[in-house]
Image (tube, rainbow, N blue to C red):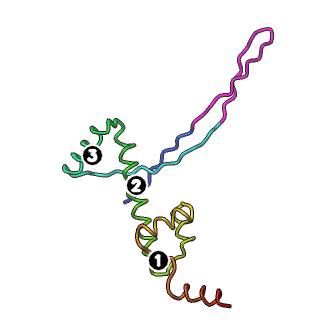
Amino acid sequence: MEFESTTSLTIFLSKIDFNYNKRKEIHTMPYIVYTIRMVVLSVELDKDLEEKLQFLMKKQKIIDKAKFVELLLTHAINKELLELLSREVRKNNLSTWKAAEIAQISLREMMHELAKREVLMYDETVLKKDFSFVEK
């Protein structure tokens, strides 16, 4: 049986209004800045992976293990997503623009990622079409 556990974190700021009347009272008004909903994920690490994680944390002087693992997971997911999107663009199943939208990056960044993976953004058909337009 699977279940999803979420944690909400609400951060409050107070606006302090120094009302200098006869009593010199201080009034505070709370404002919600943002709320973050996070899904809790439980992961078991084998001994080798735990040792590598500890080594990285020690060398980089990282104290918060959960935050560090979250950062590593974010990098890995983004890398895997870009790999998948690049394959889909290469197969012409997805446009570069749509891939950028899914990856939540700019079109220019997506084009850079495609170039790193040697994905041609111009195929022979499109190139011939462009040349025929220029010749007219």
Give the numbered dot on residue 86.
Answer: none
Q: Is 89 situated left or right of 68 in this image?
A: right
Residue 130 screen position, x and y as percent: 60, 85
User: Which image quadrant: the C terminus?
Assistant: bottom right
For the residue carrying disc 1, how many other residues have a C-alpha within 10 Å: few (<14), some (14-19), or many (20+)? few
Q: Does the residue at mark 3 contact the one at mark 1 (Cβ under 8 Å)?
A: no
Q: Earlier in the sequence, mark 3 or mark 1?
A: 3
Label the magenta part by its dominant secondary structure: strand
In this rendering, is residue 37 above or below 82?
A: above
Q: Is 46 situated left or right of 75 in this image?
A: left
Q: Which residue is mark 2?
A: 75
Q: Does the residue at mark 1 contact the one at mark 2 (Cβ under 8 Å)?
A: no
Amino acid type at circle 2 is His
For the residue carrying disc 2, how many other residues have a C-alpha within 10 Å: few (<14), some (14-19), or many (20+)? few
User: Residue 57 sits in which quadrant?
Assistant: top left
In this rendering, is residue 128 above or below 60?
A: below
Instruction: Please name the residue shown 45% across and 78% down the image.
Output: 90
Q: Which residues are magenta?
A: 11-31
Mark 3–mark 1 distance (CA, rounded to whole Å):
37 Å
Judged by depth in the image, the label closer to the viewer, 1 or 2, is: 1
Residue 35 screen position, x and y as percent: 58, 43
User: Residue 78 sits in which quadrant?
Assistant: bottom left
